[in-house]
Image: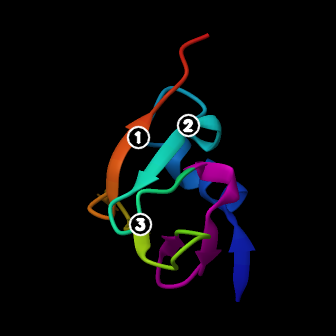
């Protein structure tokens, strides 16, 4: 199934103390910058995969296990998080 980046809010709130869906993510593949909430997300099982809305490259992966969260941001050149 396909969702938008708002689906990542719950999973990422367990890792970050800030609202990450408003952060600006820059795609390592095409260089496009978009807010995390606008990423195209697939899942939820076995984890969430967020793709660039411009080029469809994987930008972020989140997998939750019983006692840990695996987070892969390898598809991002940067993640700019607003503070306040």
Q: Which residue is mark 1?
A: 79
Percent coordinates x, y for residue 58 in the rendering: 41, 74
Residue 23: image tag: 2
Percent coordinates x, y for residue 53 in the rendering: 62, 70
Q: Which residue is mark 3?
A: 30
Determine whether, in the image, residue 28 is placed left or right of residue 39: left
Q: Is residue 48 magenta?
A: yes
The numbered mark, 3 or 1, whose residue comes first in the sequence reads 3
Q: Quadrant of residue 59?
A: bottom left
**How crowded is the residue under tag 2: few (<14 C-alpha within 10 Å), some, or many (20+)?**
some
The numbered mark, 2 or 1, whose residue comes first in the sequence reads 2
In this rendering, does residue 66 appear at all? Answer: yes
Residue drawn at (62%, 63%) of the image: 39
Determine whether, in the image, residue 30 is placed left or right of residue 39: left
Mark 2 or 3: the one toward you: 3
Part of the protein shown in magenta: 34-51
In this rendering, does residue 62 appear at all? Answer: no
Callout 2: helix, strand or loop? loop
Q: Distance of mark 3 from mark 1, alpha carbons? A: 15 Å
Determine whether, in the image, residue 31 is placed left or right of residue 55: left
């Amino acid at each position: 199934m396909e969702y938008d980046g708002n689906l990542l809010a719950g999973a990422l709130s367990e890792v970050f103390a800030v609202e990450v869906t408003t952060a600006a993510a820059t795609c390592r593949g095409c260089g496009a910058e978009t807010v995390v909430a606008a990423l195209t997300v697939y899942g939820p099982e076995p984890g969430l995969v967020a793709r660039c809305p411009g080029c469809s490259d994987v930008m972020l992966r989140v997998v939750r296990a019983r006692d840990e969260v695996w987070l892969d941001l390898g598809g991002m050149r940067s993640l700019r998080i607003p503070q306040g």
